[in-house]
Amino acid sequence: QVQLVESGGGLVQPGGSLRLSCAASGISFSLTAMGWYRQAPGKEREWVARITTLHNTNYADSVKGRFTISRDNAKNTVYLQIDSLKPEDTAVYYCNGLRAQYDWGRGTQVTVSS
C-alpha cells in the first residue's frame, strides 16, 4: 500500500523559509521520479517541482529560483526547500509521482502572512 506523508508546513512571514518533507512507503522510491504539487484555496492543484531518479530537477516558472527540490533515497524522502516566501505561495503542498499516479496524502499547509 502506497503512503505519502507530507510535513513541515506552517505559518511564516513573507520572505521567510520552510523545508517540506514527504516520506514515501510502498513504492520503489529510488526508481520513482517525484514531484511536489500545491493547491491554493479555490484553485486547482498545480505542479511546482519535479526530481528524476538521476536527481535532475525542473520547476514551475512561478517558483523558479525560490524553491529547491531534493531527495534522499536512503530515507525514501523527497524535500522542498522554499525560500523568499510570498503570500501567493499559501497552499496545501503535496508530493506524488510525476503522473500523480498514487493516492494523494493529506498534504501540509503553508500559510504566508504578516
Image (cartoon, helix red, strand yellow):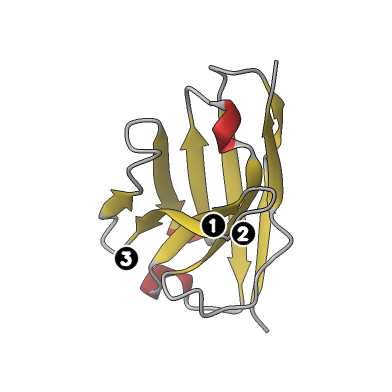
87, 32: nearer the viewer: 87
Which of the two marks, 1 or 3, is nearer to us in this view? 3
Tell me where residue 86 sits by quadrant: top right
The quadrant of the rendering that contains the C terminus is: top right
Residue at 26 percent across and 61 percent down: it is 54
- Earlier-in-chain disc, 1 versus 3: 3
- Earlier-in-chain disc, 2 versus 3: 2
Q: Is residue 96 above or below residue 11?
A: below
Which of the two marks, 1 or 2, is nearer to us in this view? 2
**Residue at the front extreme, as displayed:** 42
* Disc 1 and disc 2 in contact, CB within 8 angstroms: yes
| Amino acid identity at mark 1 | Lys
Residue receiving disc 1 = 75
Q: Is residue 7 left or right of residue 63?
A: right
- Label 2 SS: strand
Expressed as whole percent of the image width and height from the top left, the position of residue 27 reads: 54, 78
Q: Is residue 60 above or below residue 73?
A: above
Residue at 63 percent across and 37 percent down: it is 90
Whole-number angstrom distance, CA of label 1 to CA of label 3: 14 Å
- Label 3 SS: loop
The quadrant of the rendering that contains the N terminus is: bottom right
Residue receiving disc 3 = 53
Check residue 23 in the rendering and tell me which mark sits there, or answer none: 2
Whole-number angstrom distance, CA of label 2 to CA of label 3: 16 Å
* Disc 1 and disc 3 in contact, CB within 8 angstroms: no
